[in-house]
Every structure is written in structure tokens, then in C-alpha cells.
Amino acid sequence: MEPRLAPPIGQWQQLCAVLDGPLPEIAVRFSRFLAPTDAHEALIIFTRECTGRPRKVAGTPDIVERATIDELDQIKNTVGVGEVSELDAVLGGASRPIRAVRDASDTLLVLVPKRSRSGTGTSKELLAAWFAIVAVSIRQQVAQASPDYLAESRAASSERARTIAQLTEAHEDTLASVLGTLRSRDLDDRTARSTAAETASSALITLRAVGDTDRKLATEAVTTAFRRLQAELEPALRHLAADVDYVGPSVDGSPLPGEIAHGARAIVRAAAVAVAAQPGLARVRIEWDSSGDDLVVDIRDQGPGELDGELLARQLAGRLQALNGELEVESIPGWGTRVSARIPLAASAARPDEDRLSALNPREVEVLGHLALGRRNKAIAAALGVSESTVKFHVTAILQKLKVSNRGEAGLLAASAGIVAE
């Protein structure tokens, strides 16, 4: 057997470019990466980690825009964890030959090969390895819950919920009208009316189920979200000599929007790690509960009370801004520290500034944070370890996306949104 050759270095460099960019567009970048070896009509990445946009898509609109969550779930259930399968499946309302990869993280990749393409393309092992790296990148970006991800996710969730509500209302009115007509005693042909009535009733039930499925996909129960938080924190706080108490919600209240759950966990992780960095802690108490229209997080310790509250507030400003949240830090020397956050569960009306900021990618947000401090290109380049020409490129893109005419206006917009470099 001939030894399998490793991919050339250039391919790994190209894969790095797939990972470096806005999360919503990762499917487009991955599609371009695979195109030379795996010519395809459509590519879909399906992950329940991304509540705002669980489908990352690229390719033929007739396929990617019609592909449903139910179809992708069916495909995922057909493919074993860690497997690469070639099969026929319903996607976008039609049966098609596909190539599917189900990563160990339960993230799904679906490729619809071009019919004219001969050969098998990339080996199963290599395709699985490449997709595993992409899936890890997606999970890391979601776990970090950066301000741009949270803003984009919340906007997507709100838009999807609004669209589904409008469609549901329109179809309910139509089907109810059909049912009313069919149930009229003035019509003949009882059998035909009965069959039509059953069909319309079934369609109405299915339509309502769409909203239920979407809500399950886009939300987390309060208790489930807290259990995930605890599972994420325990390894990070295991080294502490102090006792760590986790106080979960008293009741499983209203479900949390997914971006709220992700963002709140990121905020709590950062705050808990900052609290744990203080010497001489005796005890840490982490509480998570929903109170009315808000998610309330409370972290208290018995320790020296030396936490730098202003530094923590600056670190969390972007995430809190994206979620319209509030943070209070109280640190009393010799007594201890309390960090509390309150995050509204309902999205407030979007402001134009927030919409523009959500269009920036992570690197542009970093550069914008330096503009907020009035720094010039040379200083920003030194801080980020890049060339001045690269910084100039990012600044130009920032001005265009924020629709401002100069660096000063961009800096003021960043400062008002809490985006300031450390």
C-alpha cells in the first residue's frame, strides 16, 4: 500500500483563511476552499450551537434557501457521529445525492456534488479532519460570544421569529378560511369535503409545529443553560482552594433566547475567572436566575476584596452592550467582592449604531477599539502585530461599514458602544 501523502502546506494556509473571518460567512469561505477538489452545487453547515443562524450556507439558492431544519435533522440522524457518508437524501424539497459529515461535536456538513463531476473528491479521512477544524472554530467563536457575534445572532433570531410569526398568521388565516368553507352545510360531495378538511387540518398542525420546532432550536431552558454554565466553569475553577457554590434557578421559568444564554455564560466565565484570580479566597458563590423579564447573575466571594471592577467592566463592555445588559461591581477590601449582571430577555428595538457595529468582523472590532482611544495607524499596528498597510485596510473597511467620514466619528461611535482597546 502506498503511503498517504499529507496535504500540501498551501492547503493548510488556505484552511486558516477559512477560519479567519465573520462567523456567518464561514460556509462561503469553506465552500471556496473545497471547490477545487470537491466541486459542489451547495454546501450547508448545520449546528445547534448557533441559535441565530443554525444553517451556514453557500451555493445554489434553490437548494440552500429551501433546505429545512427537519431535513437536516433527518440527514444528521442517518449519519453516525464521526462518519462521512455518501447517500441520497431529501434536501430543499427534493431527493438528491449528497456527501455528509457528522462531526463529533454533532455539527453537520452537507455537500451536494455537481452531477458532471467524476471521481470521489477529497478522501473521507481528510474531509472529516478539515471539517473537524471548522467545527471547532465555530464552537470557539460561539463560546467566546464576542460582541459582533451576539449582535448578529440576536438580530437573526429576532428577524426569524418575526418572519415565522408573519407566515404563521397568514397561513392560519388562509387555512381557517378553507376549513370554514369546507365545513359549510351548503356544499355537496361529503367525501370530498371530508378529505379536504382533513388535509387542511393536518397542514395547520404542521404549520404550528414549525414555530414550536424553531423555538426549541433557538432557546434554552433556564435550568439547562445553568447546567451548561456549571459544566464549563468547574474545570476552570478546579484549582481553587476555596469552596465554590453553584446556585441554580429556583424554577424553570421562561426559556432563554440562545444568544442570551451564550452571552451570559461568557460574561459569567470572565467574571468568575477574574474573581478567582484574587489571593486568599475562602468561598465563591455563583447564582443564576430569571427574574421577570431579566436574567440575573450574581457572583460573590469571601476574600480580600481586591478585584479591579473598572478593568472587568471594560473587558465586558462590548458583550453587555450587545445584550443591552448592565453590570455592577462592588469590592470592599477585607470583606469581599460582588459582581452582578442583569440582562433583558426581550430584544429592544435595534438602533442604527448597533446595526452598523454588528457588520464588523472581530479584527475590525479590535482596530475600532484603538480608534476609540485616538491611536494612529503606527501605534495600532504595533499593538496588533501587523503592518501599517493592514491597519489602513481595516480602517477603510470600518469607515465604509459604519458609514462615517473619518476616524474621529468612528472612535466616538465605538466609545459610546463600550468598544475600547485595553
Image (cartoon, helix red, strand yellow):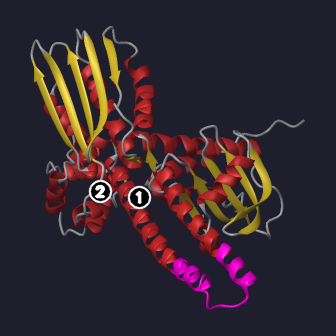
Q: For this rendering, which residue is in front, 123 or 153?
A: 153
Query: If the image is split into quadrants, where does the N terminus sit?
Result: top right
The crowding category of the residue bearing disc 2, from other C-alpha atoms within 10 Å (few below 14, some 14 to 19, many at least 20), is: some
Query: If the image is split into quadrants, where does the C terminus sit?
Result: top left
Magenta stretch, residue numbers: 174-198
Kindly identify which residue carries mark 2. 347
The x, y position of residue 47, in whole percent, is: 55, 49
Residue at x 76% of width, y 67% of height: 95
The x, y position of residue 320, in whole percent, is: 25, 45
Among the 4 quarters of the image, the one containing residue 229: top left
Q: Are marks 1 and 2 in contact (CB under 8 Å)?
A: yes
Check disc 1 and report its element: helix, strand or loop. Answer: helix
Q: Is residue 179 magenta?
A: yes
Check disc 2 and report its element: helix, strand or loop. Answer: loop
The x, y position of residue 84, in whole percent, is: 74, 46
User: Please, what is the three-letter code of the amino acid marked with disc 1?
Assistant: Ser
Q: For this rendering, which residue is in front, 165 or 311?
A: 165
User: Please, what is the three-letter code of the amino acid marked with disc 2?
Assistant: Ala
Kindly identify which residue carries mark 1. 157
